[in-house]
Image (cartoon, rainbow, N blue to C red):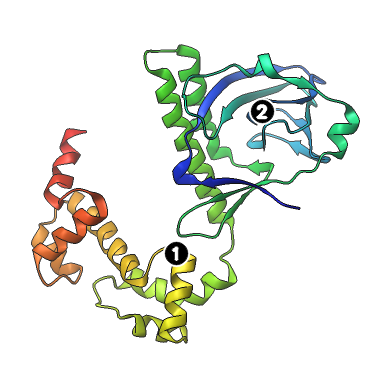
């Protein structure tokens, strides 16, 4: 069954259409119906049942379901339940909320039970394409949702833009959570020795041949496999790892000369050029930015 492709996480421009924290008595039912947008239904306390794509999910505190536009579904509380309901678009030109109530569609029980739950996938650079399941257990999602609810309710100046930022943060947290649960692919396992070597010794002047040898492959095959798995060449990955560590050391107050030496750079000029190519800032500008926030 083909999944719906959501594109790259870098291309998302989410819009929050509705966000509320509420309580419902036992046997409160929503649906069967279809939404004009995505919905995330999160349980704070109590229990609920969700029927989505012919699948039945039981939800308790910390659980949520996510489904897309025009996807037949039904929600029912099993007892007194406190929940958060979030309606959103993942890609929309305007950040201004459009309440979904005006475009909700009723559907039949049969349509709901026989609809196909195709799921969603999202591209995360440097990783395999990530599948987004309908049911997710993630108690750590609660603070993100509460901030969105508060901002949506208060409608302070610029709130629509701020909601877009908060929703982007939520999606990123969700993606990271799912990536951490996902076992590495067979192809990524093949390059793990090289990734570990770069992570442990970013100061080393690794050649492609040396990294390929750690994995037991020819340099040409290794380079192709490495770029397929990470989205960049081994050289660029090494530079990115060095600069990631450089940012940490800069924020710890270390001098540029010491950082450049620590990370294997023969000159501060070359280190600074790599740093600016990677971040858009010189090391000095990056350090100054810390005090301007």
Between disc 1 and disc 2, the foreground one is 1
| Residue 81 position (above or below residue 143) | above
Tell me how many marks there are: 2
Question: In the image, 267: left or right of 206?
Answer: left
Mark 1, other Cα within 10 Å: few <14 / some 14–19 / many ≥20: some
Res 249 visible: no
Q: For numbered disc 1, what is the local secondary structure?
A: helix
Q: For numbered disc 2, what is the local secondary structure?
A: strand
In the image, what residue occupies the spot 89% across and 29% down? Answer: 109
Query: Whole-percent x and y of residue 288?
Result: 13, 42
Question: In the image, 201: left or right of 68?
Answer: left
Rendered image: mark on residue 109: none
The residue to which callout 2 is attached is 45
User: In the image as oriented, which residue stretches furthest toward the right?
Assistant: 110
- Dot 1 or dot 2, earlier in sequence: 2
The image quadrant that residue 159 belongs to is top left
| Residue 155 position (above or below residue 105) | above
In the image, what residue occupies the spot 19% across and 72% down? Answer: 264
Query: Whole-percent x and y of residue 30?
Result: 77, 21
Query: Whole-percent x and y of residue 194?
Result: 41, 76
Q: CA separation, marks 1 and 2?
A: 40 Å
The residue to which callout 1 is attached is 230
User: In the image as oriented, which residue stretches furthest toward the front?
Assistant: 93
């Amino acid at each position: 069954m083909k999944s719906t492709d959501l594109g790259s996480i870098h291309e998302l421009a989410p819009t929050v259409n509705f966000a509320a924290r509420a309580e419902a008595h036992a046997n409160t039912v929503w649906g069967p119906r279809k939404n004009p947008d995505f919905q995330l239904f999160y349980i704070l306390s109590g229990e609920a049942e969700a029927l989505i794509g012919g699948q039945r999910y039981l939800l308790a505190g910390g659980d949520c379901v996510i489904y897309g536009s025009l996807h037949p579904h039904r929600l029912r509380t099993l007892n007194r339940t406190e929940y958060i309901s979030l309606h959103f678009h993942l890609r929309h030109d305007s950040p201004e909320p459009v309440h979904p109530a005006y475009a909700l569609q009723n559907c039949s029980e049969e349509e709901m039970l026989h609809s196909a739950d195709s799921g969603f996938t999202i591209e995360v650079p440097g990783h395999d394409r990530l599948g987004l399941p309908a049911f997710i257990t993630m108690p750590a999602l609660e603070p993100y949702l509460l901030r969105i609810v508060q901002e949506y309710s208060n409608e302070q100046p610029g709130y629509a833009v701020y909601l877009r930022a908060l929703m982007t943060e939520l999606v990123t947290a969700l993606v990271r959570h799912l990536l951490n649960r996902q076992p590495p692919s067979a192809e990524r396992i093949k390059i793990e020795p090289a990734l570990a070597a770069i992570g442990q010794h970013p100061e080393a002047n690794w050649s492609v041949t040396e990294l390929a040898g750690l994995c037991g492959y020819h340099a040409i095959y290794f380079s192709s496999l490495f770029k397929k798995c990470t989205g960049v060449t081994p050289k660029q990955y090494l530079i990115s790892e060095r600069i990631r560590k450089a940012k940490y050391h800069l924020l710890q107050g270390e001098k540029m000369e010491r950082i450049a030496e620590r990370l294997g750079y023969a000159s501060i000029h070359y280190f600074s050029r790599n740093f600016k190519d990677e971040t858009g800032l010189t090391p000095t500008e990056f350090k100054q930015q810390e005090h301007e926030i």
